[in-house]
């Protein structure tokens, strides 16, 4: 779907077709063209109308591209990503948005729905300032909105991490290792998104391109700071998950030690009992306890019981139990 907005004479309106005269070097008209999941015929506007480089057009039409920024003759080509945290699938889903930023136009290409772009499309006809400030300012608005939407997604991930942390200390079953490692992959996917985008926005903030004014560089610097903080949080998440994994393994090891301690105590207790039952079960003459043949059994049972009680008392005093 192709959506075209035109700003001229202080007014913004949505039009059905694009006039090439609006793209001329002396034109005072600002144009925003948004292509959402464009078909092959719709994508021809990139090559035929705007005359973008064939490699940039091919990249814009591909599924997923690595975040980048490239300067072509008369325009910038930028690829950035939006994210969605998918708890059930364990990972951050990415949606790339391709930008072509020219002197008086902005072209955005993205697959499917984009929250930030959809919000701006709704407000454009009612707020002329959105496009009236120029294509670079509009580009900044979209990028800033995309980065702002990172926060709730990261908070969703942090909530899932808190749940996992509680589960480790409450139940600590061996199956949690799979969830912990899945969360570690989630953090890695988050860093793969934020780190390259931080570098891209950093180049805009440093005014490496002549199309970026000092005012816009300051705005991009604010976006850059947000991405730096998100990247730092991703590093902290990674350290936190490593700590959770260590705590889980320690908990499992402690539980195993408790089981082994109980089994060792039981084995130690039954060793002298086995010795006594073996001695008095032999078919040889042994010292007899008073009371006759019937009392021999109860003497042995009493001896065993006293021996067990004495051993348990010793274990208790030495804090082995």
Image (cartoon, rainbow, N blue to C red):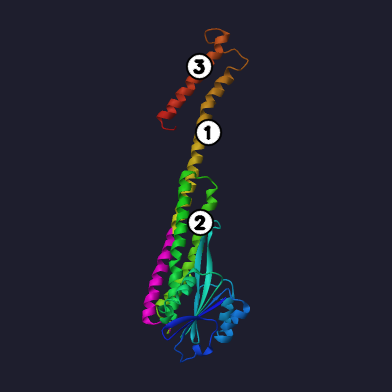
Q: Is residue 222 magenta?
A: yes
Region rendered in magenta? 211-236
Say whether disc 2 or disc 3 marks the residue closer to the N-terminus.
2
Q: Which residue occupies the foreground of this view, 249 or 277?
A: 249
Can you identify the residue that label 1 sits on? 263
* Label 3 crowd bin: few (<14), some (14–19), many (20+), radius 10 Å: few
The label number, if any, that marks residue 302 in the structure image: 3
Q: Residue at x 39, y 69 (%)?
A: 225
Q: Residue at x 41, y 64 (%)?
A: 232
Residue 43 placement, left or right of 167: right
Can you identify the residue that label 2 sits on? 183
Say whether disc 1 or disc 2 marks the residue closer to the N-terminus.
2
Residue 220 is situated, as x and y percent measured from the top left of the image, at 40, 75
Q: Of tags 1 and 2, which is closer to the observer?
A: 2
User: Residue 210, located in which quarter of the rendered image?
Assistant: bottom left
Whether residue 238 is visible to the viewer of this picture, yes or no, is: no
Residue 294 is situated, as x and y percent measured from the top left of the image, at 57, 9
* Label 2 crowd bin: few (<14), some (14–19), many (20+), radius 10 Å: many
User: Residue 44, located in which quarter of the rendered image?
Assistant: bottom right
Residue 230 placement, left or right of 40: left
Say whether disc 1 or disc 3 marks the residue closer to the N-terminus.
1
Q: In which quadrant is the N terminus drawn?
A: bottom right
How far apart marks 1 and 3 lie (CA) works out to 24 Å
> Is the C-beta separation of discs 2 and 3 under 8 Å?
no
Q: In which quadrant is the C terminus drawn?
A: top left
Residue 48 placement, left or right of 172: right
């Amino acid at each position: 779907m192709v959506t075209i907005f035109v700003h001229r004479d202080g007014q913004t309106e949505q039009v059905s077709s694009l006039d090439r005269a609006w793209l001329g070097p002396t034109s005072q008209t600002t144009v925003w063209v948004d292509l959402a999941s464009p078909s092959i015929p719709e994508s021809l506007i990139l090559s035929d109308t705007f005359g973008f480089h064939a490699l940039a057009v091919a990249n814009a039409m591909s599924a997923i591209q690595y975040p980048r920024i490239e300067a072509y003759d008369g325009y910038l080509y930028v690829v950035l990503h939006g994210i969605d945290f998918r708890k059930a699938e364990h990972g951050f889903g990415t949606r790339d948005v391709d930008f072509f930023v020219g002197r008086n136009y902005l072209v955005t290409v993205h697959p499917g729905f984009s929250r930030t772009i959809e919000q701006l499309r709704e407000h454009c006809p009612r707020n002329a300032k959105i496009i009236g400030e120029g294509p670079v300012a509009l580009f900044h608005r979209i990028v800033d909105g995309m980065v702002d939407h990172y926060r709730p997604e990261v908070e969703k991930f942090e909530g899932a991490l808190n749940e996992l942390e509680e589960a480790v200390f409450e139940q600590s079953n061996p199956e949690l290792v799979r969830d912990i490692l899945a969360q570690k992959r989630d953090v890695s996917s988050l860093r793969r998104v934020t780190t390259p985008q931080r570098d891209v926005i950093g180049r805009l903030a440093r005014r490496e391109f002549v199309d970026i004014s000092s005012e816009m560089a300051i705005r991009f610097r604010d976006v850059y700071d947000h991405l730096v903080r998100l990247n730092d949080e991703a590093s902290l998440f990674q350290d936190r998950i490593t700590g959770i994994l260590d705590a889980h393994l320690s908990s499992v090891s402690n539980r195993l030690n408790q089981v082994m301690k109980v089994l060792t105590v039981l084995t130690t207790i039954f060793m002298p009992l086995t010795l006594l039952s073996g001695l008095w079960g032999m078919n040889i003459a042994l010292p007899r306890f008073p009371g006759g043949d019937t009392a021999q059994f109860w003497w042995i049972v009493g001896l065993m019981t006293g021996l067990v009680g004495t051993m348990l008392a010793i274990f208790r005093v030495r804090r082995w139990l």
